[in-house]
Image: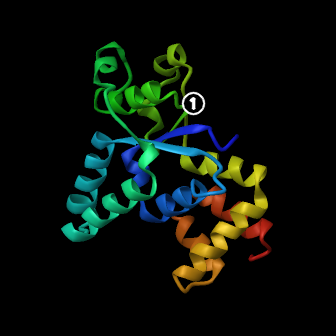
Amino acid sequence: MKADFKVTIDACVLANYAVCDLLLRLAERPRQYLPVWSDKILDEVYRTQIKKLNWPKHLAEHFRSEVTGTFPEASISDFEHIIPSLNNHEKDRHVLAAAIHSDSSLILTFNLRDFPKDALEPWKVEVSHPQDYLIVLHEMEPVQMASRIAAIAAQRKMDQLDLLLLLGKSLPNFASRLIDDLGLG
């Protein structure tokens, strides 16, 4: 994948802070991909952070401000006209529409069942679990992945193994692979 490879990130992925943090660091320069989202996706993230994850309102607002400020090119709009022509899960049609409108090649989501292959094929969009995509990024750029893992661990004042164990709650195969490849096991 090239640095101009566009990936639409579903709200369920952005709301998972540990996974989101790693993915967005991989989108910083030198970037491995270009993230894409819409206001509707970010609204869903905000609601999840407040209602399900019990984040304080100011923290959820700060998160949104940070991601939109750091990645202004990621925000897209004016895709609503595409939604009626889509046949994936009704509540996630806006995500597919955002991907189509932005020319994203991939949607990252934990909810793979909401994006069946037959609904994506006409639009030349694929779907991936974040774990599978992160493994691909690691295989392509293992030094960059190791560097980003080390930077996150240092910033959080934790060792890399603890960070990978935390990521392993959502991404068990990815975490196991990195633990082995980095010799942390």
Asked which quadrant contains residue 171, the reply is bottom right
Rendered position, 75 above or below 121: below
- 1 relative to 158 in the view: left or right: right
Count of numbered labels shown in the rendering = 1
Query: Which quarter of the rendered picture does the N terminus lie within?
Result: top right
Residue 142 in view of the camera: yes
Type of the residue with mark 1: Ser
Closer-to-camera residue (71/146): 71
Is 2 rendered above or below residue 102?
Answer: below
Q: Residues within 10 Å of mark 1 (few under 14, many from 20)?
A: some
Q: Which residue is mark 1?
A: 105
Protein image colouring: rainbow
Quadrant containing the C terminus is bottom right
Q: Position of residue 93 (x, y in %)?
A: 34, 27
How far across and how far down the image is residue 2, in percent? 69, 41
Left or right: where 165 falls relative to 71: right
Residue in the picture at 44% in, 58% down:
70
Q: Is residue 170 visible?
A: no
Q: Residue at x 52, y 57 (%)?
A: 24
Residue sitting at x 64%, y 69%: 149
Q: Name the residue nearer the viewer: 146 or 73.
A: 73
| 163 or 96: nearer the viewer | 96
Report which quarter residue 4 is drawn in.
top right
* Label 1 residue SS: loop
Residue 63 % position (x, y): 34, 63
Query: Residue at the spot x=51%, y=13% of the render?
Result: 122
